[in-house]
Amino acid sequence: MSEEVKAVIPESLLKKKKRNEEWELGKKQELVAAKKKKVENRKLIYTRAKQYAKAYEAQEKELIQLKREAKLKGGFYVDPEAKLLFIVRIRGINAMHPRTRKILQLLRLRQIFNGVFLKVNKATMNMLHLVEPYVTYGYPNLKSVRELIYKRGYGKLNKQRVALSDNAIIEQALGKFGIICVEDLMHEIMTVGPHFKEANNFLWPFKLKAPLGGLKKKRNHYVEGGDAGNRENYINELIRRMN
């Protein structure tokens, strides 16, 4: 009787096969976990967006109610002091003092028609007074913040300018602060939350277009019929023309 000859498989091939199977299994598990996380995140994002919308609506109703009450009593309702500023650079680099240039760099306003959000505090206001002829600023409303982030929002990821096309980008950069989507980012900026600094640093300075209809006289202050300086709530009208 002739003995059956068994094919001998080299040990290295067996090891390779086993390793490939392990990798494949690991990859499958990762995909399943990622899919599960994505579904959970979508539910969470939807819930949060709903909560924020409800909170904004309640805030607006309360403001209307307070204004009506003040009017009935024959007085005026004074809005609480704004916490958020939006600054736009309106002049170039001609005949600029080195200190002014340095402050504009610190504010991340390196180019004309660049815009950034800032928290209102004494240090910020002092810096703005020093560069007032070169910038215009005011208090943005919810609509302006939303339009800027959705239309012209870019993030900073690994020192690169990245379009906010996916919530995963925001989660990767700000997930550790509980900010996982555009709505979270918007809420943090609008309410000047505890992680405003991180959220604002993540946002790349907004590159706006020249305002529709042009500027009036950028060398003069806004109160003198020009464009520079503090325009308070009228910044929203300028944002509409530049966005």
Image (cartoon, helix red, strand yellow):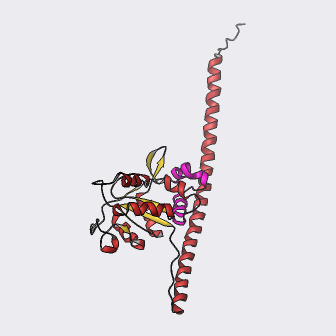
Specify the principal SS of the magenta part. helix
Q: Nearer the viewer, residue 137 or 190?
A: 137
**Residue 228 image offset from top left, x and y in percent:** 34, 66
Q: Report whether 112 appears left or right of 169.
A: left
**Residue 124 image offset from top left, x and y in percent:** 47, 61
* Residue at the spot 30% in from the left edge and 53% down from the top edge: 93
The N terminus appears in which quarter of the rendering? Answer: top right
Q: Nearer the viewer, residue 224 or 5?
A: 224
Q: Report whether 135 appears left or right of 146.
A: left
Provide the residue span drawn in magenta.
166-195
Q: Which quarter of the figure has residue 97?
A: bottom left
* Residue at the spot 62% in from the left edge and 20% down from the top edge: 13
Q: Which quarter of the figure has residue 153?
A: bottom left
Q: Is residue 189 magenta?
A: yes
Q: Report whether 38 appears left or right of 142.
A: right
**Residue 178 image offset from top left, x and y in percent:** 61, 56
**Residue 18 image offset from top left, x and y in percent:** 65, 27
